[in-house]
Amino acid sequence: MTGSVLPSVAATLPIESILLLLGLSFFLGLAVEEMVSPSIERPGGIRTIPLLSLLGLTLTVIVPGNTVFVLAGFFSLALWLSLHHVSKNSPDPDSKGYSLIHPVIALMAYLLGPVTILLPHWFSISFVVFIVLTLGGRDRLHDLAKSVPQEEIFTAGKFLILAGIIWPLVPDHLVVAWLPLTPYKIWEYVIVVSSLSYASYLIQRFFSAKGGLLAGSVFGGLVSSTAATVMLSRKAKELLPDQKASVSAELHGAIVLANTLMYLRILLVVVFLYPAMARPLLLPLLGACVIGSAMALYLVYRKKVSKDGAVAPENFPSHPLELTTALVFALSLVIVTVVLGWVGRHFGTSGIDLMAFLVGFTDIIPFVLGLVHQSTPDQAGMVAGAIMISASSNNLAKAAYEISILGLRRSIPSVIPLLVLAILGFVYAYLVV
């Protein structure tokens, strides 16, 4: 018997699967009836879709273990829907419109029968929910598609090529003895960090407008807290001479919040790449994130921000998926990893702590990755202390950036929380080392 890949289910057809199929198919048919404009001709509704699902179920179990009937039914339905589609798309301007989405829904309704019987119930439920959400989100999805610039689509395509095609081809063995990272591992770091930054960038650009400045600062901080600090400080410099005190509080709160998200970004990177090393970092990083967020919200809400005085959200960092940015990150990772290994061998923990303080005035993610990669679980205390030192010195650097842009007096409300976070980080490192 040809095509015998389906399991035999006719003899033990579970009643709960049949009831689930009936419920899901009626739900899908109702969604099609409610969400599709009556001006559009459709081959299916609350009656047809359940019948198509039952047809798929029947052809699945009528001859157990044979896919011929299922495939024959699928292609026959596809042929009929194609002819129906062609006949309804006549050049007559008075004829009803006809969308290709409806034949696709009919085919998916047919497949719902085999899916419900042969696959876990969570899959069949997700299958229907996805269809319904796609139907209901038609206008929003079209608006989103129109709002995405063409260069963003090209950038996403390039990223998929780099991550899905080139990355698997990179060799996964040590190339030189003095570099404890394989090219594959380096590229993995670049992909993970870039993915996190890119996701935050997209959310900040397309979805944070309604959330205002604070929402933008959250995602801007996940992309680059340093870039967010500089841009917010410049915006504050433009607005401070003639703005209300409440607006000043919102800007200072946004600066603190953007810097606070640096701790969450570090934790996410470690969780994705070295989950075993993430546990000892939970307390210091999440603790700093909570304390910083509390100080940021205090700055904002101690003086209620008026609707007229609210500051518009800012597009903080530049695009995080530029090839130059990725190459610079990879080069920084290689240099920091090599230097870190040399410092650890010759100067031990004190040398690593000093290096952690110095690299805090630059991008600390390469240092974090290089440190975690070359450490063992029994060195968790040293790793956590060094990471907190680098994060603290990074806060000092960003406080200096803010002072250089705004001046000392105007930057005090947000500089003080940054100094508090830095001091807490140094104290934690002193206690655990």
Image: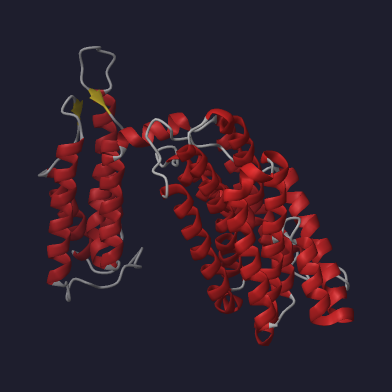
Give the residue displayed 57% in from the left and 55% down from the top. 196
Q: Which of 199 and 139 is in front in this view?
A: 199
Residue 45 falls left or right of residue 320: left
Q: Which of 327 and 83 is in front in this view?
A: 327
> Residue 49, percent across and down?
16, 46
Residue 294 falls left or right of residue 13: right
- Asked which colour scheme the image uses, the reply is secondary structure
Tell me, yes or no, if residue 43 can be seen here.
yes
> Residue 162, percent across and down?
66, 50
> Residue 286, percent across and down?
52, 68
Tell me, yes or no, if residue 184 can be seen here.
no
Give the residue displayed 18% in from the left and 71% down from the top. 10
Q: Name the quarter where the N terminus is drawn.
A: bottom left
The mark tally for this picture is 0
> Residue 313, percent across and down?
49, 37
Give the residue displayed 26% in from the left and 40% down from the top. 136
Residue 258 falls left or right of residue 372: left
Q: Which of 365 and 166 is in front in this view?
A: 365
Instruction: Using the rendered view, name the quadrant where residue 323 is placed.
Output: top right
Q: Name the quarter where the C terminus is drawn.
A: bottom right
